[in-house]
Image (cartoon, rainbow, N blue to C red):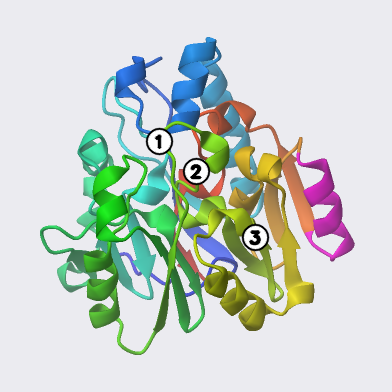
Amino acid sequence: MSSLNINNEYGSLTKVILGVANSFGGTPQIEECYDPKSKENVINGTFPIEKDLIEELSGFLHVLEKYNVNVIRPEIIENYNQIFSRDIAFVIENKIIVSGIIDERKKEIEGIKNFFSEIKSENIIKLEEGSRVEGGDVILDGENVYIGYSKDAEFNKYKVARTNEKAINQIKDLFPHKKVYSFELNKSDHNARENALHLDCCFQPIGNKKAIIYEGGFKNTEDILLLINKFGNENLIRISKEEMYNMNSNVFSISENVIVSEISFKRLNNILRELGFIVEEIKFSEIAKMEGLFRCTTLPLQRL
């Protein structure tokens, strides 16, 4: 049986599910897009093609394998987008929680159902009916669990609102020993620069007590102040609206010292190196056109 162990975003990664772009369904119709950045690129004729997406994921795979990570890939579902593995499930400690995901993406779980047969049934948790959460909104940092969400009125209003209060309450019940903090995020179905699709689009701890943050993604100032208090002002790497739009907060930590980042993130990558991180730069700009990046394409299963 496979064991699960995830308590933070930066412990030494040993096992992960990485998304696939093969037979991803091609360019959608505008009305089929469920995030504003995809919609923007469909309208502009710049939506990515399959060959480029496969190439970028292969580059990420090679970096993960360089650090001896055991990489699992979903079984391919024909003509279906399976790039963003992060959202379909997430691990807290030794439990894997199957996300309450939007209807357009529900088939994605079928791509990893064979993996579930390797896990003890008591460690697989399916949320109650009406609980909605996607893994991009759930960020772990030791005893702390940070969750991005929308209150019911906004959750029902926006397609890009993916996590609700009912799911947060259930996670609190499942992990009573954890400190669960919930942050309302700013949402827009039409403007990617005004939309924090998930919490990891505007915040992520990266190890060594550092975190990346885009303060404009948060609806409430008190949530930003809480994170300043938790991490220390000097340990927060602030990014601009344009850097948020380009997904700068969605880098991926292989360990507390190694971060995978996009080759075009020059300012951020220089800061990370100055702080002592090893930065593995690869091209991922086509995947970014669908409002996701490195963290979004991964579902970590084991970290030391």
- Asked if the residue at tag 1 contacts the one at tag 2, i.e. Cβ–Cβ closer than 8 Å, the answer is yes
Q: Residues within 10 Å of mark 2 (few under 14, many from 20)?
A: many
Above-or-below relation of 228 to 260: below
| Residue underneath mark 3 | 213
| Residue underneath mark 1 | 189
- Residue shown at 31%/39% (left/top)? 159
| Residue underneath mark 2 | 195
> Does residue 304 appear in the picture of this structure?
no
Residue type beneath disc 2: Asn
In the image, 143: left or right of 231?
A: left
- Residue shown at 31%/49% (left/top)? 88
Label disc, if present, on residue 177 of the rendered structure: none
124 and 39: which is toward the camera: 39
- Residue shown at 69%/76% (left/top)? 209
Q: Residue lying at the far right in this picture: please name it.
A: 274
* Residue 92 placement: quadrant: bottom left
- Magenta stretch holds residue 167: no
Q: Secondary structure at mark 2?
A: loop
- Residue shown at 73%/59% (left/top)? 238
Q: Residues within 10 Å of mark 1 (few under 14, many from 20)?
A: some
Q: Residue lying at the far left in this picture: please name it.
A: 129
- Which numbered disc, 1 or 3, marks the residue that appears first in the sequence? 1
Residue type beneath disc 3: Ile
Highlighted range, magenta: 265-277
